[in-house]
Image (cartoon, rainbow, N blue to C red):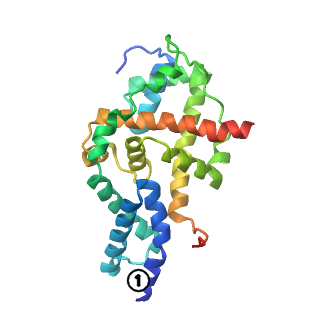
Amino acid sequence: MTDFAIQVEGLRPHLMRFARAQLRNDAWAEDAVSECLLAALERPQAFAGQSQLKTWLIGILKHKLVDQLRRNTREATILVGEDGEDLFDDLFQADGHWREAPKDWGDPDAACCQKQFFEVLQACCEHLPPAQARVFMMREWLELESDEICSELAISPANLWVLLHRARMRLRDCLQARWFDKEAA
Amino acid sequence: MSQKNTLTCREAARLLLEDEDHELPAADRLALQLHVRVCFACARFVAQLNLMRRATRAWRKHSEEADEEPQPE
């Protein structure tokens, strides 16, 4: 193997972790990472060395992740109805007031930079229903625009919005229970 | 677009979530501003959404860049 190939191959575990976090499916993650490594090895000249090798590979991997999602999305459309309850009904009284005011989460800087907090955040993402997790990751990790996500997944903007809205509310509940309540205890 | 400038908390929360994903019409943004200024509960909800947004970005950056310690096989 060339030095380049050795370096690229050495980043495989890192890429796998990134892909797994996104796809939550080992087989798809494996596929995406293999495609990414192949693409990199086929066009080493594309790596001009201005960026870190890892950053360059993550850039390629993001495209491969989107391909995987596109390939495996048939269920995503169906899954729009997977979580029928309107979480808002539990949160608000009939007159539109909060049943219980949101808690004070304190200084954002304290939570944002802690590795343990990221682990909780990841666990909370993993507990989202699959379609919600997928659109949330596409939006927040792959940084796709809403209209791109809609066309990739063949869902309407209204469906996308419902999924994202539910994902955010579930994450909020999960972070409250698994991080902020414990911190206060 | 809502014409009224008084929102219930439920309406405000819905708009705040919508605002995470696309820019709201000016009338909605104004109504939100007015509501959040006088409603401590919704102000906290805003802070929670901000924290989640920042934390998600920081987590992503961490995953992209962090040199992981070698995992024993």
Picture residue at 45% right of the left edge, 24% below the top: B30
Q: Is residue B30 above or below residue A78?
A: above
Q: Residue furthest bottom?
A: A2
Percent x, y of residue A152: 27, 49
Picture residue at 44% right of the left edge, 15% below the top: B5
Nearest the eye: A65 or B66: A65
Percent x, y of residue A89: 47, 20
Quarter of the image for residue A31 reads bottom left
Picture residue at 50% right of the left edge, 14% below the top: A96
| Residue that label 1 marks | A5
Nearest the eye: A171 or B73: B73
Amino acid type at circle 1 is Ala
**What is the chain identity of the residue bearing mark 1?**
A
Q: Is residue A76 above or below residue B19?
A: below
- What secondary structure is marked by label 1? helix
Q: Is residue B60 above or below residue A176?
A: below
Observer able to see residue A43:
no
**What is the crowding at mark 1: few (fewer than 14 residues within 10 Å), some, or many (at least 20)?**
some
Nearest the eye: B17 or A34: A34
Percent x, y of residue A99: 58, 18
Q: From the viewer's perspective, is A49 left or right of A103?
A: left
Percent x, y of residue A14: 50, 68
